[in-house]
Image (cartoon, rainbow, N blue to C red):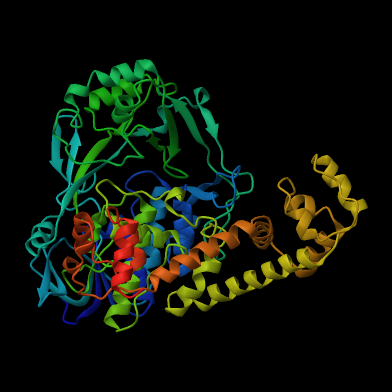
Amino acid sequence: MFEKEYDVIVVGGGHAGAEATAAAANMGSKTLLVTMNLQTIGQMSCNPAMGGIAKGQIVREIDALGGYSGIITDKSAIQFKMLNKSKGPAMWSPRAQNDRMRFAEEWRMALENTPNADFYQDMVTGLLVEKDKVVGVRTSLGIEIRSKAVVLTNGTFLNGLIHIGEKQFGGGRAGEKAATGITEQLVDFGFDSGRMKTGTPPRVDGRSLDYDKMMPQPGDIKPEKFSYLDTPVLKVQRDCHMTHTSALVHDLLREGFDRSPMFNGRIQSIGPRYCPSIEDKINRFADKDAHQIFVEPEGWNTVEVYVNGFSTSLPEDVQYKALKSVKGFENVKFFRPGYAIEYDYFPPTQLKHTLETKLVNNLYFAGQINGTTGYEEAASQGLMAGINAHLKINEKEPFILKRDEAYIGVLVDDLITKGTEEPYRMFTSRAEYRTLLRQDNADLRLTPMGYEIGLAREERMKRMEEKQEKSKLFVDFFKKTSFDPEEMNPILEELDSASVRQSDKLFKVFSRPKVTMDHMLQLDSVSGFVREHDLDTEVMEQAEIEVKYSGYIEKEKSNADKLHRLENVRIPDHFDYSKLKSLSYEAREKLESIRPVTISQASRISGVSPADISVLLVFLGR
């Protein structure tokens, strides 16, 4: 069946596996995606949504590089919101509700239309390794398929164990069996492994809910989209709704705590801190009488509803009784109860920044196997692993994003340098250069890089260059063009902003906090320039941010330049830290374990102090 050798084999068809397959195949590698169920490629295992705080920036970065997640999201969206609009643009985060079935269908069609991508349905139970180098995989049918590189994107399937109250059974997802064999083999190779937990809420019948008792949560009046390409913009949207738990609901849930696997010791692994189960929220925030529940439709036509905020592993009778006491859920019908799932992961400090493992050459890990949580975090890792697997087997330079270049760079560096003992989720606060890493400029930051490595297509590059050129032209116009005080002052008076006595450059008055692009467009010179050069909303938004935040942007660029100086101080591959007696014991231990490539990376390792960095710099002659 498989006489030829593949360039890259991707194991697992979730968000990480789908992006890895697309990236490697689009760059020219003959790629095979092996998954246990071809019907669940790109499956939204948890909530039917993409994006959110920091996660939306990641989806736009994936798109800018030439990945598929943004395109798939736009094609299957049922609602769009730009979150944090009341804050500065560094915090703006796009989020879309999606049609779960269409999302998976669009992923399947996109991959089937990708040249160089093949598919096979089976469980991978082991790796073929020769002389510390992976050379293929072995499936449950005993078939051996050879390749030059392998990307493992196993999600929650590695020895997955599902918990509902006192019941537990093997599974990687509801209705699907767990994957076995790989963890044990990797441990034999010398890898450290651990266990993590995540959970999901009940799915219910929307026809049984009373939406009149809930608060509607509509999408934006003027919805945007994720992809920088010509994907569809929503003309009609579906509302979500919001309701709340109550003291009564909490009391009913507490009645089942003695049967909860979280509290009776059955689950000992750590779950996501920022997406806790409802029982965890009640336990941790005992002073709160209510928690928000977001009622999210699963698609355009289905009646299935996702009860966001009610993730639980309590017994199904307790779940049902408590949920019936939530306003609007009095007559609720369950499609399936919520559950928790435990699964194996491998601490990511065992990887290089390319996501290749340190112990086995040409073997890459991406997604929840690295201890992350979230579709977006997984997809970005899959993209980077697929890219680097292709580059490695073609003897090309690796592709590594820096912390000031992308949220993806922050994500990978955090994992590799700091590791994680709980499911890692991206937040804007994790990025020290978030003014540079905005959702609006992901194409300007990353499309040239994607084009250079052969992933982003020429059409994408031309669109980016046109946007860049028009934005610069518009910013220069504000810097060079003066305003008439008689035309400007009525606008300023309306905003309670100090009037101007004499003419000055538009840039100066536009920099004022209250003055927006809509106000500037009231000036004949500005509106005339927009019409003359056919500037769209995206270009105008880009120019507005460049004008209003130019000082902050320049300051962050300066700070990033300082960081790059330490990035240029490389540490020899086989450096012997035991020679440096002036290093603290903890620093020696951490440095020996993680093996940082540069002084900059070493400085970000927890337990390595500034004094330890000084010792290293002195020893390296810097």
Q: Quadrant of the N terminus?
A: bottom left
Which residue shows up at 42% across the image and 32% down it?
206
Residue 178 in view here: no
Residue that extends furthest to the bottom in the rendered view of this protein: 395
Say if 130 sits above or below 491 in the image. Answer: below
Q: In front here: 517 or 239?
A: 517
Say if 451 sits above or below 164 in the image. Answer: below
Q: Is residue 248 left or right of residue 370?
A: right
Quarter of the rendering containing residue 257: top left
The picture places residue 491, in percent across and down from the top left corner, at: 84, 46
Q: In front here: 489 or 45?
A: 489
Which residue shows up at 45% across the image and 48% down it?
429
Q: In front here: 209 or 405?
A: 405
Quarter of the rendering containing residue 413: bottom left
The picture places residue 235, in percent across and down from the top left corner, at: 60, 50
Q: Quadrant of the C terminus?
A: bottom left
Which residue shows up at 31% across the image and 55% down it?
609
Q: Is residue 263 left or right of residue 530?
A: left
Residue 469 in view here: yes
Q: Is residue 435 left or right of residue 181?
A: right
Q: In front here: 369 or 177?
A: 369
The picture places residue 518, in percent across and down from the top left corner, at: 75, 51
Say if 401 sits above or below 397 in the image. Answer: above
Q: Is residue 89 left or right of residue 176?
A: right
